[in-house]
């Protein structure tokens, strides 16, 4: 009979090389765990950063008070921001609702009817959504019923915790207030830049909105966040000339400027790369939903303004881009929230990066720098 010891002696012994391979396998097996831990820590850091920024919104900007009805409206693109705002708002009030609505198709589109109905029942509405709800009938109805509203179209996690959202909104409020004396009794605006912008139009100086300062603590107030702009309704039918958008259009960083030809307040032609074709299609679809006699109104130059937020930057997110100190913007489409007559359900802004701006004979911006 074969010796069991002999049989055992024939078993292959592990070499030093085999041991090294086993050790490498153990190390490699541990690496995913380390990566998971890093991901968890990063997620916790983001969650905390979102919460700290949310507190600036709920505690400082909106100044939520005990027992106030608060509605937070987000969509699938802003869910984490919505949760952070909900968590923060509940520190101030126990009447806080968070609702996730379907993502819209464009700026100015009305929210679903149940959401619109809920808005009318609140004292505070905070809306971080992919597309802007600012210029909608639903927001106007909520404001009329006494709500104060903050909208955050195009908001991302990164934007929410950095850039324009980190500004001193009380200082921006002061800067906007100081601007009022410069705007007083000026009615003709002239905008030029080195790219070919050369456009003139009239405004009513009493219509300038200087409330976009981030402090929204009284009934019927509305602000964008991040805040920091002065804006006005161009008098309908008065604008003529050329506007060259060279910064961003909606949420697109432009590789080639867009040239808009304006006659009597209406964009009659647009030149540019493929973005121009996409814009024509977008506005054509909006026009197709209107009565034939109103379709031209989708091309109304609906709003003009300039940025006052020193922490904002051109990032490709128009919510922040139009607030950058020294820029100006024009919006096309619906102007009813500013008192106009173009009720077209679409409102899209484009930013000019280094404008020169005159109010009557007074120059206030020179190639993107405020004139002292």
Image: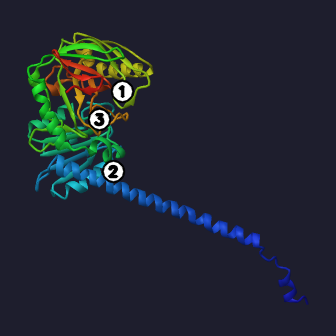
Mark 1 is surrounded, within 10 Å at the Cα level, by few (under 14), some (14 to 19) or many (20 or more) other residues, namely many
Position in image of residue 177 (x %, y %): 12, 34
Mark 3 is surrounded, within 10 Å at the Cα level, by few (under 14), some (14 to 19) or many (20 or more) other residues, namely many
Q: In the rendered image, which residue does mark 3 sit on?
A: 319
Q: Is residue 192 visible?
A: yes
Of helix, strand and loop, which one carries label 3? helix
Query: Camera-side residue: 112 or 364?
Result: 364
**Mark 2 vs mark 1, CA separation in Å:** 28 Å
Considering only order in the chain, which callout, 1 or 2, is on the residue closer to the N terminus?
Answer: 2
Q: Is residue 52 left or right of residue 254?
A: left
Query: Residue 294's quadrant in the figure?
Result: top left
Query: Residue 147's quadrant in the figure?
Result: top left
Position in image of residue 7 (x %, y %): 86, 84
Q: In the rendered image, which residue does mark 2 sit on?
A: 80
* Disc 2 to disc 1: CB gap under 8 Å: no
Viewer-nearest of discs 3 and 1: 1
Q: Which mark is residue 247?
A: 1
Height in image: 284 above or below 13?
A: above
Position in image of residue 140 (x %, y %): 15, 33
Of helix, strand and loop, which one carries label 1? loop
Position in image of residue 149 (x %, y %): 17, 41
Outermost front residue: 372
Considering only order in the chain, which callout, 1 or 3, is on the residue closer to the N terminus?
Answer: 1
* Disc 3 to disc 1: CB gap under 8 Å: no
Query: Camera-side residue: 45 or 1?
Result: 45
Outermost right residue: 1
């Amino acid at each position: 009979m074969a010796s069991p010891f002999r049989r055992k002696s024939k078993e292959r012994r592990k070499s030093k090389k085999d041991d090294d391979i086993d050790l490498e396998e153990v190390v490699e097996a541990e690496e995913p765990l380390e990566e998971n831990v890093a991901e968890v820590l990063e997620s916790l850091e983001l969650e905390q950063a979102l919460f700290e920024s949310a507190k600036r919104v709920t505690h400082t900007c909106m100044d939520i008070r005990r027992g106030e009805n608060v509605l937070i409206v987000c969509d699938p693109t802003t869910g984490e921001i919505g949760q952070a705002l909900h968590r923060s708002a509940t520190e101030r009030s126990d009447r806080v609702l968070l609702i996730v609505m379907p993502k819209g198709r464009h700026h100015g589109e009305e929210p679903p009817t149940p959401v619109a109905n809920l808005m009318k029942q609140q004292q505070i509405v905070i809306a971080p959504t992919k597309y802007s709800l600012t210029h909608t009938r639903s927001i106007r109805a909520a404001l009329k019923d006494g709500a104060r509203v903050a909208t955050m179209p195009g908001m991302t996690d990164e934007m929410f915790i950095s850039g324009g959202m980190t500004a001193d909104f009380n200082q921006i409020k002061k800067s906007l207030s100081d601007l009022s004396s410069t705007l007083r009794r000026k009615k003709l605006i002239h905008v030029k830049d080195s790219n070919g912008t050369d456009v003139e139009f009239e405004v009513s100086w009493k219509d300038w909105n200087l409330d976009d300062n981030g402090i929204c603590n009284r009934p019927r107030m509305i602000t964008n966040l991040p805040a920091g702009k002065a804006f006005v309704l161009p008098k309908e039918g008065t604008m003529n000339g050329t506007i060259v958008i060279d910064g961003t259009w909606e949420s697109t960083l432009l590789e080639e400027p867009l040239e808009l030809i304006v006659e009597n307040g209406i964009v009659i032609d647009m030149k540019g790369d493929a973005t121009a074709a996409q814009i024509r299609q977008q506005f054509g679809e909006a026009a197709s939903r209107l009565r034939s006699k109103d379709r031209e109104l989708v091309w109304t130059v609906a709003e003009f303004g300039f940025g006052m937020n020193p922490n904002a930057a051109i990032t490709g997110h128009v919510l922040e881009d139009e607030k950058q100190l020294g820029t100006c913007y024009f919006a096309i489409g619906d102007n009813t929230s500013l008192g106009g007559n173009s009720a077209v359900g679409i409102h899209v802004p484009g930013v000019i990066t280094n404008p020169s701006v005159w109010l009557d004979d007074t120059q206030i911006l020179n190639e993107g720098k405020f004139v002292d």
